[in-house]
Image (spheres, rainbow, N blue to C red):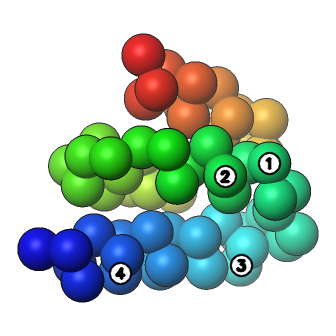
Amino acid sequence: MQASFACVIFFGQKFLEDKFGMVPGKLIDQIHTLNRQDVLENLFRQAMRCSDLDSFKQLLSKAKE
């Protein structure tokens, strides 16, 4: 289960970089604070619909609630 969780974070981060370019380290750190794989998977799926990094930040903020 742990390897799968790490893969979700790794590929999610790569997706964000491909979509938005450079992703600030602070944002990556916030992603790493999420500890539920299902929440991360949903977050990255929703990121596909985000038009910019600010939209993703709003999603991340909601995911942390």
Q: Is residue 25 left or right of residue 10?
A: right
- Residue at (27% x, 70% y) in the render: 5
Residue 63, image x, y percentages: 43, 29
Question: Mark 1 is on which residue type?
Answer: Lys
Classify mark 4: residues with Cα within 10 Å, few (<14), some (14-19) or many (20+).
few
When asked about the image quadrant of residue 21, the answer is bottom right
Measured in 3D between alpha carbons, the distance from the residue under mark 3 to the one under mark 2, in whole angstroms, is: 18 Å
First in residue order: circle 1 vs circle 3: 3
- Residue at (42% x, 16% y) in the render: 65
In the depicted structure, whether residue 63 falls above or below residue 25? above
Question: Mark 4 is on which residue type?
Answer: Cys
> Are circles 4 and 3 on residues that touch, CB within 8 Å?
no
Measured in 3D between alpha carbons, the distance from the residue under mark 1 to the one under mark 3, in whole angstroms, is: 18 Å
Image quadrant in which the N terminus is located: bottom left
Q: Secondary structure at mark 2?
A: helix
Residue 7, image x, y percentages: 35, 81
Callout count: 4
First in residue order: circle 2 vs circle 4: 4
Residue hosting label 1: 26
In the depicted structure, whether residue 6 falls above or below residue 42? below
In the depicted structure, whether residue 27 falls above or below residue 25? above
Residue hosting label 2: 29
Measured in 3D between alpha carbons, the distance from the residue under mark 4 to the one under mark 1, in whole angstroms, is: 20 Å
Residue hosting label 3: 18
Which mark lies nearer to you, 1 or 3? 1
> Are circles 1 and 3 on residues that touch, CB within 8 Å?
no
